[in-house]
């Protein structure tokens, strides 16, 4: 029985079987294919899939042309150094003080100034403060109670002194009487008009009066000392009341503010830091070899990047007598006027010392052009770019370097003026390599 075909009529493939063989029909939804034809086609497909890649892999490779390496080049330049020595320094205020309360307490009031919108606000860092301005006050109740206590102690000490003086007067009078009685008894005793027991009684009364006199004098001295102590405490209390209001000792700018209203502050803890910047100090380090050179220079120029196209003149006002144990540099200081308060504490300054002899021109290349040559881990080299047959090729050349000048470095020998060196991508090059110069 032939299988039924759903929707399509079966067709028989017109293939002839071998002689003596009965054809075997293979049924397909579309056509009938003879088994031997199917095996033939499958063998051809397998050959294409497995043998084709092997033949492709055995074919010769196509040559690969590496594209030129892109590089930046620059001609060797000359550098004429500034006529003098340059140092980096830090700007500090002329005077800077930490304002603190002598006693602890709660902050009751802080200076109010007019803000940009016209409303009062607490003083802030960066505000200008005039001399004598009260910056902050402690709670007055604590200070006044302490002053009242000191005054009561002083009054008690003065009363004790008065009592001691009165007692001293009384003892002094008794001493005088005892002295007179003893003198009379002594006279009569020598005249043999007074017996020995009565003489001894008079003498004992005198000695007792003398002891009382010494005790009264000591008590008076103690009372006077208490009075003096009370007066000193009163003066201290009055000074504490005065110091409860923190005043600015000079005109200056507020550098730091460490308190707020209602906060508790301890004695001696800085509440504000005030700085006088009418003049500023520029501090920088000097080596021992540079000190002698600067002593013959009459003028120094100070500049800062924050204020371009403006220079400030000054002279060295101080050189430390000893070097810093860590950096081995001697700290030097220049004091320069600061009109308009342009210079701020903390700015980085550049100090240039003018020299009477001009410096000569030297050859320099960028630091990025320097590479290590192969086989010489301690040497230095650059890649020279030349045009050969319309192509740009690079060749390595050893150089001797001098001092560093920012992002450039001095070349002592190995190069000629005008030669073009690779300044970008040099670490990826080899000698004789073709490159592409990009701007």
Image (cartoon, helix red, strand yellow):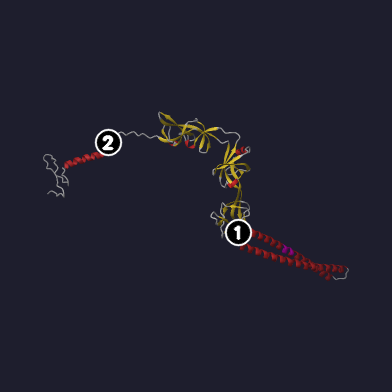
The structure residue drawn at horizontal position 74% and vertical position 66%, both measured from the top left corner, is 162
Q: Quadrant of residue 193?
A: bottom right
Give percent across and percent down for residue 366: 49, 36
Q: Is residue 121 magenta?
A: no
Q: Quadrant of residue 292?
A: top right
263 is higher (above) or lower (below) than 3: below
Q: Secondary structure at mark 2?
A: helix
**Quadrant where the image shows the C terminus:** top left
Q: Nearer the viewer, residue 252 or 202?
A: 252
Q: Return the residue at label 1.
A: 137
Left or right, 322 with reference to 398 = right
Region rendered in magenta: 220-224
93 is higher (above) or lower (below) than 85: below
Q: Nearer the viewer, residue 432 or 147?
A: 147
- Numbered marks: total: 2
Q: Main secondary structure of the magenta part?
A: helix
Give percent across and percent down for residue 88: 56, 42
* Residue furthest out toward the top: 389
- Whole-angstrom CA distance, mark 2 to mark 1, is 98 Å
Q: Is residue 222 magenta?
A: yes
Q: Return the residue at label 2.
A: 55
Give percent across and percent down for residue 20: 11, 40
């Amino acid at each position: 029985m032939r299988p039924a075909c759903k929707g399509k009529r079966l067709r028989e493939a017109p293939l002839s079987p071998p002689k003596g063989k009965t054809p075997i029909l293979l049924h397909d939804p579309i056509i009938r294919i003879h088994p031997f034809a199917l095996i033939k086609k499958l063998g051809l497909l397998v050959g294409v899939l497995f043998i084709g890649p092997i033949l492709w892999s055995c074919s010769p490779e196509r040559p690969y042309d590496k594209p030129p390496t892109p590089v930046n080049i620059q001609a060797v330049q000359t550098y004429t150094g500034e006529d003098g020595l340059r140092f980096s320094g830090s700007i500090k205020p002329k005077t800077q003080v930490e304002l603190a309360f002598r006693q602890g307490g709660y902050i009751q009031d802080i200076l109010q100034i007019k803000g940009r919108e016209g409303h009062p606000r607490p003083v802030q860092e960066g505000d200008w403060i005039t001399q004598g301005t009260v910056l902050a006050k402690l709670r007055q109740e604590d200070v006044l109670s302490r002053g009242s206590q000191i005054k009561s102690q002083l009054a008690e000490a003065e009363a004790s002194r008065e009592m001691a003086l009165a007692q001293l007067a009384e003892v002094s009078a008794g001493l005088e009487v005892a002295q007179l009685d003893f003198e009379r008894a002594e006279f009569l005793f020598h005249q043999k008009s007074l017996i020995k027991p009565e003489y001894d009684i008079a003498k004992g009364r005198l000695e007792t009066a003398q002891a009382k006199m010494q005790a009264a004098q000591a008590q008076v001295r103690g009372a006077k000392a208490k009075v003096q102590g009370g007066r000193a405490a009163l003066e201290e209390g009055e000074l504490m009341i005065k110091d409860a209001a923190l005043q600015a000792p000079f005109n200056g700018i507020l550098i730091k503010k460490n308190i707020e209203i209602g906060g508790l502050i301890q004695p001696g803890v800085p509440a504000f830091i005030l700085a006088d910047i009418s003049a500023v100090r520029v501090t920088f380090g000097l080596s021992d070899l540079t000190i002698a050179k600067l002593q013959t220079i009459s003028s120094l120029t100070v500049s800062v990047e924050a204020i371009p196209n403006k220079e400030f003149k000054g002279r060295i006002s101080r050189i430390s007598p000893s070097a810093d144990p860590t950096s081995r540099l001697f700290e030097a200081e220049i004091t320069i006027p600061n009109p308009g308060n342009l210079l701020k504490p903390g700015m980085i300054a550049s100090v240039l010392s003018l020299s009477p002899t001009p410096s000569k021109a030297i050859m320099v290349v960028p630091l990025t052009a320097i590479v290590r040559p192969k086989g010489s881990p301690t040497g230095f080299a650059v890649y020279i770019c030349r045009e050969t047959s319309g192509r740009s090729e690079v060749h390595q050349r050893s150089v001797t370097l001098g001092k560093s000048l920012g992002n450039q470095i001095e070349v002592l020998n190995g190069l000629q003026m005008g030669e073009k060196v690779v300044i970008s991508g040099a670490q990826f090059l080899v000698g004789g390599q073709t490159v592409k110069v990009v701007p």
